[in-house]
């Protein structure tokens, strides 16, 4: 099942992924990379309005999944970082939310 079709759970949050699992999941998310135990990607937009619209839509998704990213918001770009602080690294929840974030940025198929 595609990552974006899955939902976060407390069970996923308690299981930190190992390097092999991270590499396998990362292959499913072009444009994302691991930095300092976080899953990171940058998104560019035409202007501030589009940037904030993306941030608001992502906040809605994060609230629904009960898993929240760290964001760095600028005029026409956003850096998104997912990690599970309680697990001390990356969990399946981070990859699920990154996939939902990517789907949001890509728009309708």
Image (spheres, helix red, strand yellow):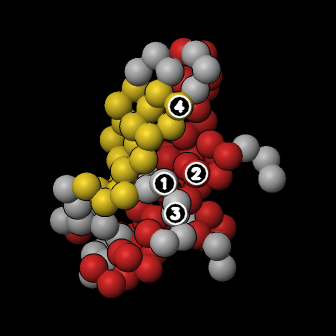
Q: CA distance from mark 3 to mark 1?
A: 6 Å
With respect to residue 71, does 109 lie above or below? below
Q: Residues within 10 Å of mark 4 (few under 14, many from 20)?
A: some
Which circle's residue, 3 or 2, is located before the other in the chain? 3
Counting from the top left corner in percent of width and height, residue 29 is at 52, 63
The reply to whether the C-beta atoms of the residues labelled 3 and 2 are less than 8 Å apart is: yes
Q: CA distance from mark 4 to mark 2?
A: 12 Å
Q: Which residue is mark 2?
A: 102
Q: Residue at x 50, y 37 (%)?
A: 43
Viewer-side residue, 92 vs 43: 43
Q: Quadrant of residue 18?
A: bottom left
The reply to whether the C-beta atoms of the residues labelled 1 and 2 are less than 8 Å apart is: yes
Which circle's residue, 1 or 4, is located before the other in the chain? 1
Compared across the picture, whether 104 is left or right of 31 comes to right
**Residue 31 has which mark?**
1
**Residue 29 has which mark?**
3
Q: Is residue 64 visible?
A: no
Q: Which residue is mark 4?
A: 44
Counting from the top left corner in percent of width and height, residue 108 is at 79, 47
Q: Secondary structure at mark 1?
A: loop
Which circle's residue, 4 or 3, is located before the other in the chain? 3
Q: Secondary structure at mark 3?
A: loop
Q: Residue at x 54, y 70 (%)?
A: 28
Q: Secondary structure at mark 4?
A: strand
The reply to whether the C-beta atoms of the residues labelled 3 and 1 are less than 8 Å apart is: yes
Compared across the picture, whether 93 is left or right of 5 comes to left
The reply to whether the C-beta atoms of the residues labelled 4 and 3 are less than 8 Å apart is: no
Compared across the picture, whether 61 is left or right of 72 comes to right
């Amino acid at each position: 099942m595609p990552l974006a079709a899955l939902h976060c759970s407390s069970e996923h949050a308690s299981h930190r992924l190992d390097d092999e699992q991270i590499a396998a999941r990362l292959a499913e998310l072009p444009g994302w990379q691991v930095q300092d135990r976080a899953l990171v990607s940058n998104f560019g937009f035409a202007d501030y309005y589009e940037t904030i619209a993306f941030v608001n839509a992502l906040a809605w998704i994060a609230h629904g999944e009960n898993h929240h990213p760290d964001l760095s918001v600028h005029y026409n770009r956003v850096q998104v970082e997912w990690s599970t602080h309680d697990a001390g690294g990356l969990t399946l929840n981070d990859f699920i939310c990154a996939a939902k974030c990517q789907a949001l940025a890509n728009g309708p198929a």
